[in-house]
Image (cartoon, rainbow, N blue to C red):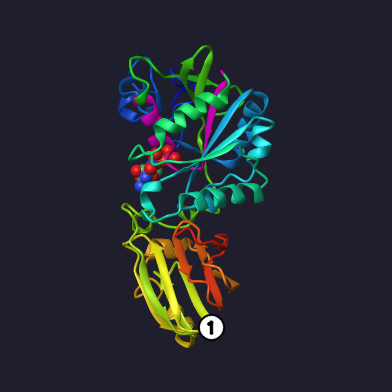
Amino acid sequence: MDTIYCQGCGIQIQSSDPEKPGYTPKSSLEKENILCKRCFRLKHYNEIQEVSITDDDFLKMVSTIRNANGLVVHLIDIFDVNGSLIKSLPRITGDNPIVLVGNKMDLLPKSTNQRKLVQWLRKQAKDAGIKVLDVFLISSIKGHGIEELSSQIDYYRKQKDVYIVGTTNVGKSTFINRLIKQSTGISEVITTSYFPGTTLGFIEIPLGGNASLIDTPGIVNRQQMSHYISEEDMKLITPKKEIKPRVYQLNSEQTLFFGGLARLDFVKGQKQSFVCYFSNLLPIHRTKLEKADHLYENHLGELLTPPNEKTMETLPEFTESTFKISQEKTDIVFPGLGWVSLSGEEATIRAHSPKGVAISIRKSLI
Ligand code: GDP
């Protein structure tokens, strides 16, 4: 096939992988003025579709943002902070100011302490070397916090461009589509522009004056659970609705399995409650610590599911971390899956997760 370029963004057209940039179905190749699927949807539906890019392509974009002058809005998934926080962000953004936005608030129980959540997000960002001007919590799907955020973006950007950055699946498209819907009265709100040296067109939404809101492609992060597990399993572990806490009273030397994707051993301590915040569809299995290894080795993918068969092929082995809890209500966080809240009584906990998906602890959010 001749090399064809999209009339919208300039990307090379391909018909083999709908998930990759530049996709156009074969049936459309005969037309004049060929657009890639992404530009087609933009043009006809004013709707943004996510494409993901490789780390290499992303690095090529780096200098574009670093040399630009504007506000960076970093969208993350509060359900998977570790997986969605872009650790290399300061390298990418140079001296440009950053606003951190936690999306998917609607999934957290209503009793979540938002102030503590904001504090924790600030700390996570700081630990990763990311200096943020401000932190906001929103739900792109429900629309919570969007109005406040857009007026704050308008304030912080100081007439300049706004770059929206995020890893795949944080809800960037949903967020931007909502912003577009909010900016009423403008037809042709979106244009695409082609950045030389990258395989991608950024999407620009005029903001008034000469400034634009610029959507950048989703970055794939290998620390994300979604990187390792099948689409079907992703559906199970991604909460669709507000999470209902599940409470277990455990004695020491008992174990909880979260499907077969994570495991928590209560190694030492008085009997106490373990409040589990995971997708309501993820089965939790309780067993004796002494039986846990055997169960895992012999029943992974059956009794302990997800993983399903497909995920089993790619799922890395478990690694473990040990935490000593005392005095303070503490959450043990399994990135991309959920967390377990402990009351603060003394406890020694051993937590297991697939290698590469690091477990952490924080002050309880609830
Ligand atoms: P992108 O890859 O960053 O563009 O993410 P999408 O906008 O495609 O969203 C990824 C997934 O997260 C989709 O299943 C969305 O429905 C979901 N999602 C996006 N925003 C929210 C939100 O505010 N709350 C919830 N519960 N889900 C969301």
Q: Residue at x 58, y 21 (%)?
A: 158
Question: Helix or strand or loop: what does disc 1 sit on?
Answer: strand
- Cβ of disc 1 within 8 Å of ligand 1? no
Q: Is residue 325 left or right of residue 278?
A: right
Residue 292 at x, y = what percent? 46, 82
260 to 68, vertically: above or below:
below
Q: Nearer the viewer, residue 175 or 290?
A: 175
Magenta stretch in the rendered image: 159-181
Question: Compared to 103, does 330 lie above or below?
Answer: below
Residue 257 magenta: no
> Magenta segment: does it hold 162?
yes
Residue 254 location in percent, x, y?
46, 83
Q: Which x, y percent locates residue 150? A: 45, 28
Q: Residue at x 33, y 15 (%)?
A: 185
Q: Amino acid at mark 1?
A: Gly
**Residue at the far top in the pictured view:** 209
Above or below, 328 against 38 in this view is below
Q: Quadrant of the N terminus?
A: top left
Q: Residue at x 51, y 19 (%)?
A: 212
Q: Quadrant of residue 303?
A: bottom left
Q: Which residue is mark 1?
A: 269
One can see residue 304 in this view = no
Q: Quadrant of ligand 1?
A: top left
- On the image, the x and y values in percent for residue 188 come to 37, 15
| Visible residue check, residue 162 | yes
Q: How many marks?
A: 1
Question: Which residue is outermost to the bottom?
Answer: 290
